[in-house]
Image (cartoon, helix red, strand yellow):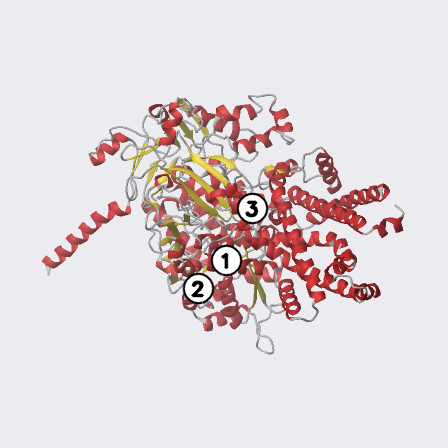
Amino acid sequence: MIRKLMEVSLSLVLCLALAVPLLAQGTYNTPAEYEKATGNKIESFSQASMLRTMVAAGEILPLEMRLPEEPLVVEAAEEIGRYGETLYLTMPEEPAGWSFSSYWLHEPPIQLTPDLSDLYPNWLESFKSSEDYKTWTLHLREGLRWSDGAPLAAVDVMFWYEDIIKNEELFPVKPVALMHGGKLAEVEKVDEYTVKFHFAAPFPDFATGYLTLPEYMYNTGIIIRPKHYLMKYHIKYNPQAGELAKKEGFDHWYQLFDIKSAQGTAKPIGKPTIQPWVLKAIGPTHATFERNPYYWKVDTSGNQLPYIDRIEVKSLASPEAYLMSIMGGETDFALSDISMKDIPVLKKNEEKGGYELRLWKKMQGAAVNYFFYQDYEDPVMKEILRDVRFRRAMSLAIKREEMKGLLFFGKGMPSQATVPPGSRYYVPESWQAYAQYDPEEANRLLDEIGLEWNKEHTFRLRPDGNPLSIKIQGAAWALAEGPLQAAAELVKGYWEVVGVKTDFEFPEHLVELFSAKKVAVTTHVFDMPPDFIYKGWLWPPISTEWWGPMAWYDAWIEGGRTAAEKEGVPENVIRFYELTEEFGGAVSEEEKIRIAQKINLLWSETLWVIGTVGGDLPSPCVVKNYLRNVPQVGYVGYFNFQQIPTIPAQFFISK
Amino acid sequence: MLFYTIRRLVYMVVLLWAISVIGFIIIELPPGSYLNVYMAQLRARGGSVNKALVASLRKQYDLDSPQYVRYFKWVWKGLHGNLGMSLQKQRPVLDLIAERLPATIMLSLSTMFFVYVVAVPIGIHSATHQYSGGDYFFTFFGFAGLAIPNFLLALVLMFLFYKYFGVSLTGLFSSQYAAAAWSMGKFMDMLAHLPIPIIVIGTAGTAGLIRVMRGCLLDELKKQYVITARAKGVAERLLLFKYPVRLAINPVISTIGWELPAIFSGAVITSIVLSLPTVGELMYTALRSQDMYLASSCLIILAALTLIGTFISDLLLVWIDPRIHYEKKG
């Protein structure tokens, strides 16, 4: 018996030991570290043949000068790749848009490891915080260059801080993260390649919460801007900047500056970057990217990345055309804007399209969520929405098992919209609270509130005698991300059984309705960030907008509890804000888990958001047969734009 | 003749101006503005939007001035060649429209060409072989094309081409040729992508024209002079084309002007579904995000193209039918 146990555990350990290298696609901060870890030495570096030609023609510097002193070493997911080839992609957005850029061009200062368990410095060489987490020291990779060959150093960080963030015309409102502690952080240049960030309050989350985030989402996740290129558009360095702007058709210098320095996009052509591919041409429906000769990553044999020479992106206007293009094999890779509901049709056309459909993991508390807006314009309905019994009743009235079978092919589990299993912050009671199907209890709760049935016993009535009716609203642009419409149809049926007349629509301009308080119940898909960047809230930050006015959060940010109370923020909402702030300031893992548990229980107690089906739900990833080094299983989600652990720079095409 | 032309041109300018005013007002009618969309994006990206930022953005995008000020500023700048900045795409509107104009015009012209080349002969055939099998056949397909919504037809055709020819014909070019310089291969590639949009956009117009052509020609063929000519032994083909067709084609030519708006608006839906780089599709995305300068400019461009089309149609009519010129006395 004991021997059997030992055998089993030994084989388990062996399996894990073998599996780990398969799961993890490692990176090593420097070639020296790579040698220390594996015993292999990188003898020499080599480059793509098209770059060799450019060196010979004198257009770019030789390879030794282009790479930084210590390039990042990337272990290929499958095998060492081959240079060359053009990658063809189709995207359901304008060329060089958000989805494409956030996946293929994403280079934050710090990155998450493939298994989402740790951070590693990306284009930074190292990052360290002081004991009290108030000071962060960032050391840049020496010798790193921009895509036009100009050296990248601390001056570019200082340019970003002094001349962009601190400039009142460019940033009249400072980014929230830099205002941590109530005061704008100080950035100090220590030497040519080192900077220090000083915060007014301890900021243990700075690395995970800010430096891993891409410029494509947070508008501020980048801490560096090419000074040599942007100087001539900045009024401080060029008094003619205003005239320059007027010549281009703008009224103010900062409008042209914004365009030229544009964060979150590969445009305009000519802007120096540190991304693997650089925008070379753009038209109404296509964009062309070419390799960055000054890219600072190499593979374990010393080959400078990326392998792929060129990327051609074709832009499609409708989701049907996009799906068609995937089925027809027009795109070499597809991850965004396809979801579970497309899996059957994509699987069927695998051979015809010449691709493989892989199932990646989507990290969600619950796939489809319903938000009950807490500040609806109609006072009678507002009271009902604010009554927690109503929200609990609505949650109990949903037949989650049926939804699981009809919409999710039987995968996943009935759940609420809190942290799912697999995360260290998972609280089982919270994830399953009110997730059972109990229409009797739902009816009982609705009766308790005082919502009586009408004479014909078809619908319930509000206290003022009008029929109780709800309109579920979602965003039209989110329809591709999950079965929102189908789910709304099902939920309409469930809620009408308990007497709540329900309707649904997916307007284009949902956001205006939020600020006008014209939404009662909304629906959306939200992803749960991995533990490392979890902040206590659902994506996006606080997601308050979907269930409460932003004015509440703004008031709390500006004036704390007193301002929030004056604004009329309910007590448990203030409590939620306080808990998330506590979580952000927590240092030890135990403390974080403790606070996260409180947050999760608060979520499931208040049920401002109810979930339907969550857990292990697959998401499709289409990979052309000749595209290699794409992991078999990856993660999909907004939290870090679906790109982490795959490092597209090490993809290659083998025809 | 000269007066006629000048008068038409003056009408065009007045009409264009009226369209610009109405269009501008309508585009700004929905509550909120691009600012709401932008602020929502900012918030979703973690920035917090407070009153100071809102105020500065309002100033930056000129939203504080009254509507007529904004309108006049836009017109003034427009006359100087500056159509403003697309708020969403962060590029000058003129650039965005200019890069789509060739495709738009080409698509519309080829569709019109297809419509007339197909409809007129079929209409003539239908009239001369009234109630025959061919007549019924063409009529049926014409009406089917008229009745089926454009987007549905586009999706179905796209799928059928994929199923039976194995090619997915999205967009105007394949990925390989999209960015390449013009070559024979690129031209052939474009020709391969054109059939679906032309068929989809054109079927509605074709159906109508066939019926008009058929009806007008039938009326003409019943007239006395046709019977007389036949009795006198004029060859059928010569007889048909020298008089009745020329007369019957009058209403067909004069309605070219009406066909154009139908083609442009039909092209919008089709362009969205098939991802064609046209001005209509640009206008649609601009309207969705209330990108007012872009939307208004697209509207003006499309209106201008339509007006030019009707103007050409007027000139054609005068050329074909001299009676108009004499009657109107310039």
Observer-side mark, 1 or 2, equals 1
Residue A114 spot, x, y in % from top left: 32, 44
Q: Helix, strand, or loop for circle 1?
A: helix
Q: Is residue B45 left or right of residue A137?
A: right
Residue B6 spot, x, y in % from top left: 83, 41
Residue B155 spot, x, y in % from top left: 54, 58
**Residues at marks 3 and 2, CA–CA distance in whole angstroms:** 30 Å
Q: Is residue B112 left or right of residue A595?
A: right
Q: Earlier in the sequence, mark 1 or mark 3?
A: 3
Could you say which disc has been placed on residue B62 in the image? none
Q: Helix, strand, or loop for circle 2?
A: helix
Kindly identify which residue carries mark 3. B40
Kindly identify which residue carries mark 1. B161
- The one nearer the camera, A402 or A229, is A229
Name the quadrant of the C terminus of chain B: top right
Q: Chain of mark 3?
A: B
The verdict on a common chain for dots 1 and 2 is no
Q: Helix, strand, or loop for circle 3?
A: helix
